[in-house]
Image (cartoon, rainbow, N blue to C red):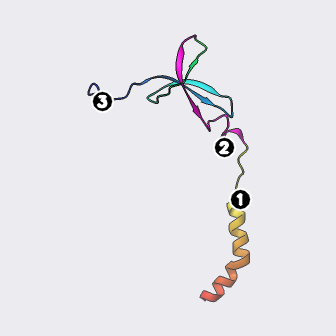
Amino acid sequence: MKPGIHPAYRPVVFRDRVGGLTFLTRSTATSDRTIEWEDGNTYPVIDVEISSASHPFYTGAARVIDTAGRVERFERRYGTEAARRRG
């Protein structure tokens, strides 16, 4: 790697404000705010709107769309009529 052209890769805390999840990882993201972590060190903190703690897919609050039922309902309503017109 060329020296001096890559951003600093350092420990950063990401915090989900809605879900209350915080986790320490390494990133090139920057922030002016800091937080004291469980190990006693201070790290930059980045607030995120959605994480696995608050996203409906991970929390189980996501709605499942019944695409097969919708297609069948469409075919019942319009399928035979559209086939007759083409025919």
Q: Position of residue 87 (x, y in %)?
A: 61, 89
3 or 1: mark nearer the eye = 3
Name the image quarter holding residue 57. top right
Name the image quarter holding residue 73. bottom right
Q: Would you say residue 83 sits in the magenta stretch?
A: no
Q: Secondary structure at mark 3?
A: loop
Q: Position of residue 29 (x, y in %)?
A: 46, 30
For the residues labelled 2 and 1, the Cα–Cα distance comes to 16 Å
Other residues around mark 3 within 10 Å, as few (<14) / some (14–19) / many (≥20) = few
User: Hey, what amino acid is under mark 1?
Assistant: Asp
- 28 relative to 67, above or below: above
Which residue in the structure is indicated by mark 2?
57
Closer to the chain start, of discs 2 and 3, is 3
- 85 relative to 65, above or below: below
Q: Which mark is residue 66?
A: 1
Q: Position of residue 5 (x, y in %)?
A: 30, 30
Q: Which mark is residue 5?
A: 3
